[in-house]
């Protein structure tokens, strides 16, 4: 072999080991991909909230059916989010997020023109499926690529998520008016943002495929046997290597290191902290989706114009932009995140009280307070990264906490719609929101204790 041929595998090995020259560009591109993806994780929901009355009239929905529509996001997040770790192990996290962005773009483009409530729900589910897998994998990607900057990267991701959420709430109504007043045009325009988010992930999809091809070629060229070649990068092949070691003739030495490369995944269902975090995640998601789906309608029913109601919802969402960066960084510096949980809960209770007593007169103050309370989401994401020691542990905990949490949050928005329709006002729905804030504070305080799911699962 010529000298360049000899050096090229060494250069590739150096890249895999994380040298600065080879890992600098993927990290920069990854930051861009994380930010663009986060921008797309809520416009599908908040753009609909801003135009919910028009969509209800256009599709002939009752209040109960509209409540069902606002419950679709957590349902999809629960069902599809649990699949994310398995898909990431099979195809790579970058490929799965890339496919998720494509699903968001397709769903947002199709749903306004699908025809009828059933088609609207089906296209919404496609977009929400892409959001679900990306939701789960973002903490995993941050933990893997930025293990020493979990707080700051989670803050950046949460800031972008809050920015996308508030942007959709603020500009959907004005853009709809500029496009001729059609709610279909106002909803479908957000597909373009999802298309832009696909691009930064494409190199990671190709890189995964190239790595797989190199591994297969290396397996065929080595004299050790195909099982041992695959074991260098695959957990499944690692288990086969163990079997091959047991069946090998005496005197044949099989390398043991590849089978130990990936630590075992903990059984998070045996961890009390995992259950507390799942309950906290579910209850804060309940509050968030009630807010995103119904708060603009609360203000509109109180006499606030539609455009102003959209801006109020945007104010609630935009509060997460600065706080989503501050709260995760503060949380990583504290041994116990419970005090932050309690402070956010008190703001939520004050905001609900204001909505009940004077929804129009103090609208801007209530929007700000509820926006502060909604920052329980970046705090929950930060705690996912802090309550597990290893990458597999974070993946398991993220999937469990988010999937279980979103299952918990499904009835909330639906029940609000039913109470609103049958009571004829917002008194009972707001009382429900206030009541749910109490267990959210309790479970969040328990989840904030300084411990890891690996320690509890091994007991």
Image (cartoon, rainbow, N blue to C red):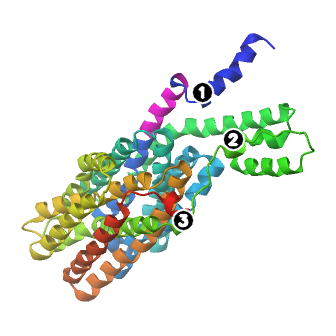
Q: Residue at x 9, y 72 (%)?
A: 358
Residue 335 or 292: which is nearer the viewer?
335
Residue located beneath label 2 in the image: 233
Tell me: residue 430, above or below residue 398: below
What is the x, y in percent for residue 156? Answer: 34, 43
* Mark 2 → mark 3, Cα distance in angstroms: 30 Å
Secondary structure, mark 2, is loop
Q: Residue at x 60, y 27 (%)?
A: 15
Q: Residue furthest bottom?
A: 422
Mark 3 is surrounded, within 10 Å at the Cα level, by few (under 14), some (14 to 19) or many (20 or more) other residues, namely few
Residue located beneath label 1 in the image: 15
Q: Name the mark on residue 47.
A: none
Residue located beneath label 3 in the image: 459
Q: Nearer the viewer, mark 1 or mark 3?
A: 3
Q: Residue at x 56, y 49 (%)?
A: 96
Q: Are marks 2 and 3 in contact (CB under 8 Å)?
A: no
Tell me: residue 402, above or below residue 390: below
């Amino acid at each position: 072999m010529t000298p360049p041929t000899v050096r090229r595998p060494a250069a590739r090995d150096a890249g895999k080991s994380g040298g600065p020259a080879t890992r600098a560009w993927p990290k920069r591109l990854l930051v861009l991909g994380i930010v663009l993806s986060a921008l797309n994780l809520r416009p599908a929901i908040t753009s609909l909230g801003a135009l919910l009355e028009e969509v209800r009239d256009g599709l002939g929905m009752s209040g109960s059916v509209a409540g069902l529509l606002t419950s679709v996001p957590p349902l999809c997040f629960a069902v599809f989010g649990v699949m994310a770790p398995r898909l990431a192990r099979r195809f790579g996290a970058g490929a799965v997020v890339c496919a998720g962005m494509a699903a968001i773009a397709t769903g947002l483009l199709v749903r306004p023109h699908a025809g009828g409530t059933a088609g609207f729900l089906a296209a919404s589910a496609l977009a929400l499926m892409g959001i679900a897998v990306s939701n789960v994998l973002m903490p995993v990607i941050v933990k893997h690529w930025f293990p020493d900057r979990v707080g700051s990267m989670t803050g950046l991701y949460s800031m972008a998520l809050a920015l996308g959420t508030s942007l959709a709430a603020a500009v959907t109504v004005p853009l709809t008016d500029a496009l001729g007043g059609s709610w279909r045009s106002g909803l479908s325009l957000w597909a373009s943002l999802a298309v832009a988010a696909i691009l930064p992930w494409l190199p990671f999809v190709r890189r995964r495929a190239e790595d797989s091809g190199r591994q297969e070629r290396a397996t065929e060229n080595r004299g050790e046997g195909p099982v041992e070649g695959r074991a260098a990068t695959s957990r499944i092949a690692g288990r086969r290597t163990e079997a091959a070691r047991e069946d090998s003739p005496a005197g044949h030495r099989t390398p043991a290191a590849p089978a130990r490369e990936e630590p075992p995944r903990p059984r998070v269902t045996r961890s009390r902290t995992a259950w507390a975090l799942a309950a906290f995640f579910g209850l804060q998601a309940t509050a968030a989706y009630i807010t995103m789906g119904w708060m603009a309608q609360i203000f509109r029913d109180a006499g606030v114009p539609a455009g102003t109601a959209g801006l109020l919802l945007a104010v609630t969402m935009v509060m997460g932009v600065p706080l989503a960066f501050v709260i995760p960084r503060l949380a990583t510096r504290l041994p116990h995140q419970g005090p932050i949980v309690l402070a956010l809960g008190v703001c939520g209770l004050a905001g609900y009280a204001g909505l009940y007593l004077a929804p129009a007169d103090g609208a801007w103050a209530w929007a700000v307070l509820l926006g502060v309370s909604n920052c329980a989401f970046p705090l929950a994401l930060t705690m996912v990264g802090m309550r597990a020691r290893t990458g597999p542990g974070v993946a398991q905990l993220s999937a469990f906490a988010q999937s279980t949490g979103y299952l918990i949050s499904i009835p909330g928005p639906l029940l609000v719609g039913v109470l609103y329709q049958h009571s004829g006002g917002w008194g009972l729905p707001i009382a429900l929101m206030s009541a749910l804030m109490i267990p959210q504070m309790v479970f969040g305080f328990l989840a904030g204790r300084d411990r890891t799911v690996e320690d509890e699962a091994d007991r």
